[in-house]
Image (cartoon, rainbow, N blue to C red):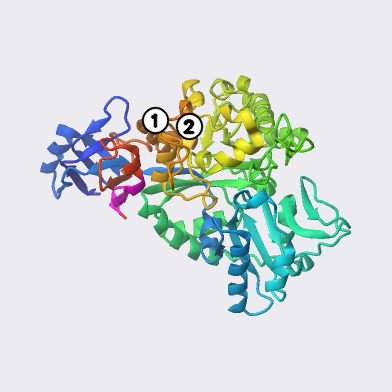
């Protein structure tokens, strides 16, 4: 078979390869990189070779978001976007949507954040009942670990004053015990289970649209943490040759029995779609004040967060997964949760030392736990944009503990592999916003808290952050031998930028645009 030969020349190519970090030309044969610089130009004599002058443009390896929820993002494109709104504005959005929606249809929204409101008070059902009495309404918080529902939604879900709190979650309640509409952790699922589920085909259609948004900002691959039916929908797109981004798919706990029964193992699949492992939750989130801490939240002496799996539950599940050849990706935000997860991963590691276990978020660590990730070979899957966006509430509720929060530099210096992402749609998946946060520790909107950034000792260099968005993500999925760099033998995933981000101040990252994207040697 004759493979297409392409030579891209007159470019400023950041290869990400430690032994050959920069190049001015690259040769691609079929879906892979064949050569760099002078050896690349020699391929111009190959039959049918094309040569393209990039005019000095900067080229990066394809960027990978190592933690997002693509189905959630895709389906929520039609939901109410409540990000950065006051509660009054959220209610007004609901009223407007209710006026144009047939009675009885669900109204959904996402992104509200009570930490932006006076007093930081959680909302209740009352205001939603007033503007949408004939529609069930559920609005998910930015953290995705809390939601507010109206009375119609609670009725459809069968939630009453007599309904007990679910294990690892609770309902907000009025003094007489009546649910007030707030749903924390597992209580969310009680109400969300009443929302009509989309079909696999509906999810596939939504994902097909969403992947164009990813490619537009230079994302050529994702590690997806959504629940079913996302995996089936990705397979549908792959079968139709309509999956244009590379996907490493993680399963949720409710599918573990089926995964083990089918003999599914981490790494099964191909370079376009593969099974990554099992996603678990060890605790809640800072936004909902449910992240599990070693000491209580500041000003809340009775609240140290919640473990969403009891320690022995987590140990049993982790052991079953590891024995079955399934890597673990465990959500842990608070220092108590991270300590527990490290203990559990230390215990199960001997069961299958080849598995690439990871901790998702790793937002707050006890000092003694910082070196443990590297020592145990655990990947830190982190989202830089969380740090500047969380600063105010972290300082309010964690106090002096923020000195050891979002500790990218400390982890990297200890030898930990970082894999960076966004947690979209909790945050934007634009990787240049993430890179800006990683190198400045500043908010992209106003530069807060100032030129030095928040705890500037934890900043990363641009090359370090890029490595975590490329090679680090590939390593987390066991793909570091063929993805994450532009080196001979590697898959030709690359991004052409409109500016040289290495020669400009970090603020230029906020204005950087992607000119072109290539996946597997094909411009997409």
Q: Residue at x 67, y 79 (%)?
A: 103
Label 1 CA crowd tier, 10 Å (few <14, some 14–19, many 20+): some
Q: Position of residue 73 (x, y in %)?
A: 52, 57
Instruction: State the quadrant of the C terminus.
Output: bottom left
**Seen from this angle, which residue lies furthest left?**
45
Quadrant of the rendered image containing residue 9: top left
Residue 21 located left or right of residue 43: right
| Extent of the magenta region | 510-523
Is residue 521 a member of the stretch shown in magenta? yes
Name the residue tied to disc 2.
Answer: 418
Q: Position of residue 456 (x, y in %)?
A: 46, 29
Name the residue tied to disc 1.
Answer: 464
Residue 427 located left or right of residue 186: left
Q: Position of residue 402 (x, y in %)?
A: 59, 31
Dot 2: what SS?
Answer: strand
Residue 426 appears anywhere in the view: yes
Quadrant of the rendered image containing residue 168: top right
- Mark 2 touching mark 1, by CB under 8 A? yes
Q: Nearer the viewer, residue 147 or 271?
A: 147
Cα gap from disc 2 to disc 1, whole angstroms: 9 Å
Residue 79 located left or right of residue 168: left
Answer above or below: position of 105 versus 322.
Answer: below
Q: Nearer the viewer, residue 391 or 18?
A: 391
Q: Position of residue 43 (x, y in %)?
A: 15, 40
Residue 177 located left or right of residue 72: right
- Lower position in the chain sequence, tag 2 or tag 1: 2
Is residue 518 a member of the stretch shown in magenta? yes
Q: Nearer the viewer, residue 448 or 424?
A: 448
* Label tally: 2
Residue 481 appears anywhere in the view: no
């Amino acid at each position: 078979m004759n493979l297409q030969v392409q030579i891209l020349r007159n470019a400023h190519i950041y290869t990400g390869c430690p032994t050959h970090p920069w190049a001015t030309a690259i040769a691609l044969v079929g879906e892979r990189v064949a050569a760099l610089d002078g050896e690349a130009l020699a391929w111009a004599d190959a039959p049918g070779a094309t040569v393209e002058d990039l005019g000095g443009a900067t080229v990066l390896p394809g960027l990978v978001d190592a933690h997002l929820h693509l189905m959630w993002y895709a389906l929520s494109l039609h939901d109410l976007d409540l990000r950065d709104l006051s509660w009054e504005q959220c209610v007004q959005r609901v009223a407007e949507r209710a006026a144009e929606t047939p009675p009885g249809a669900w109204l959904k929204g996402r992104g509200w954040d009570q930490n932006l409101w006076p007093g930081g008070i959680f909302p209740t059902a009352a205001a939603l009942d007033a503007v949408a009495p004939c529609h069930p309404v559920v609005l998910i918080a930015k953290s995705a670990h809390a939601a507010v529902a109206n009375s119609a939604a609670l009725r459809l879900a069968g939630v009453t004053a007599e309904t007990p709190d679910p294990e690892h979650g609770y309902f907000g309640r009025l003094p007489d015990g009546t649910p007030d509409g707030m749903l924390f952790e597992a209580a969310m699922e009680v109400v969300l289970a009443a929302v009509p589920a989309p079909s696999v085909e509906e999810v596939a259609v939504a994902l097909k649209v969403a992947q164009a948004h990813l490619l537009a900002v230079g994302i050529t691959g994702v590690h997806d943490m959504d629940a079913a039916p996302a995996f089936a929908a990705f397979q549908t797109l792959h079968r139709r040759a309509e999956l244009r981004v590379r996907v490493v798919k993680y399963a949720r706990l409710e599918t573990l029995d089926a995964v083990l029964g089918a003999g599914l193992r981490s790494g099964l699949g191909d370079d376009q779609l593969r099974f990554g492992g099992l996603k678990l939750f060890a605790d809640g989130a800072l936004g909902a004040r449910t992240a599990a801490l070693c000491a209580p939240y500041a000003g809340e002496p009775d609240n140290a967060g919640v473990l969403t799996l009891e320690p022995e539950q987590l140990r049993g599940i982790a052991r079953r997964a590891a024995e079955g050849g399934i890597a673990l990706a465990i959500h842990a935000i608070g220092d108590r949760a991270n300590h527990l997860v490290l203990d559990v991963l230390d215990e199960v590691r001997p069961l299958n030392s080849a598995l690439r276990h990871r901790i998702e978020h790793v937002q707050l660590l006890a000092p003694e736990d910082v070196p443990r990730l590297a020592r145990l070979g655990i990947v830190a899957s982190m989202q830089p944009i969380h740090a500047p966006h969380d600063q105010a509430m972290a300082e309010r509720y964690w106090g002096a503990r923020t000195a050891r929060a979002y500790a990218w530099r400390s982890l990297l210096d200890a030898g930990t592999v970082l894999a960076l992402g966004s947690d979209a749609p909790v945050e934007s998946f634009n990787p240049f916003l993430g890179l800006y946060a990683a190198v400045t520790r500043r908010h992209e909107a106003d530069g807060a808290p100032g030129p030095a950034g928040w705890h500037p000792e934890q900043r990363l260099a641009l090359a370090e952050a890029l490595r975590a968005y490329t090679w680090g993500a590939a390593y987390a999925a066991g793909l570091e031998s063929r993805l994450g760099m532009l080196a001979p033998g590697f898959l030709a995933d690359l991004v052409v930028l409109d500016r040289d981000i290495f020669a400009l101040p970090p603020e230029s990252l906020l204005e950087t645009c992607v000119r072109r994207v290539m996946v597997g040697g094909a411009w997409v």
